[in-house]
Image (cartoon, rainbow, N blue to C red):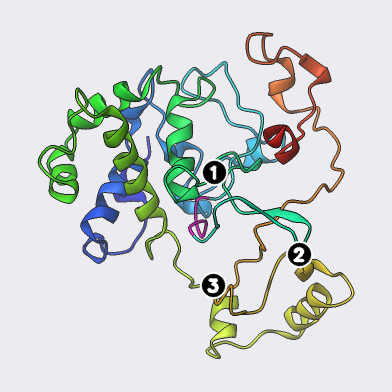
Amino acid sequence: MVTPQGASAADPSDLTPIEQLGKHLLFDVNLSTPPGVACAACHGPDVGFTGPDSAINAAGAVYPGAVHTRFGNRKPPAAAYAGDSPILHYDADAGTWIGGMFWDGRATGETLGDPLAEQAEGPFLNPLEQNNPEAKQVCIKVSHSGYANLFREVWGPQSLDFVKDVAGTYQRIARSIAAYERSPEVSAFTSKYDAYLNGSATLTGQEEDGLELFEGKAKCANCHVSQPTDAIPKPLFTDYSYDNLGIPKNPANPFYSMPPKWNPLGDAWIDYGLGAYLK
């Protein structure tokens, strides 16, 4: 199983206490039912905090959960560089929805004021992912963990009171994970392109040609913003909007063959994304 020590070569002392706490939570294999599947099982540090199994990514692209015969219906998105997504809202000028988390925007951010923290609440309770029956069970597991004292240090002496304040405790768990995902260990901005933007690296001729196409004739940058703006000072190759690309079904996705309890439509299931959530 992945451990926190394997997350990065970065010095753990570079993390703030809440970031350290979030790291423990993200790599804790005991926070699933049955134990064994940490958040990092689908958000691996060696591959930009997305799905780490190349064989899975090349085929069905969706990952098994704590119950290994159950699969989600979408490939895990990257948890890195996700902290700037705004609260889901409709931009009338652009004529599109912007923000939120998950591929369908359902972690809107309206409840916690933070889409990234709301996303962190989801997989723990998803029967196709970490399969905990209720938030209280997650809180109990954290209270029995080796980092429970760090949790209280960060959030206060009564912050793990899962008897009186399940909702508050669960939110603090999610906010801690979001803090780690925003940390320089996860969102480092150390790519060659980052260095190119700040003037400390030079692109090769082929890379320059690719960037010219990306920002010009290919029109990739229309959605995948590649230059700093007032709104996005560090470009993340997204404008946080949603687009229907007309991608066909992936017949290798094991979700299509899941039992009716999890996929009542079987082969007829269609992923409507944001549209299904808004409906």
**Disc assigned to residue 146:** none
Residue at which label 1 appears:
52
| 58 horizontally vs 132: left or right | right
Q: Residues within 10 Å of mark 1 (few under 14, many from 20)?
A: some
SS at mark 1 in the image: loop
Count of numbered marks: 3
The residues bearing labels 1 and 2 have C-alpha atoms spaced at a distance of 38 Å
- Which residues make up the magenta segment? 79-83
Q: Nearer the viewer, mark 1 or mark 2?
A: 2
Kind of residue indicated by mark 1: Pro
| 39 horizontally vs 213: left or right | left
Coordinates of residue 261 in the picture (x, y in percent): 63, 9
| 127 is within the stretch colored magenta | no
| 81 is within the stretch colored magenta | yes
SS at mark 2 in the image: loop
Coordinates of residue 43 in the picture (x, y in percent): 49, 44
Q: Residues within 10 Å of mark 2 (few under 14, many from 20)?
A: few
Coordinates of residue 232 in the picture (x, y in percent): 58, 73
From this view, report whether residue 65 is shown above or below residue 222: above
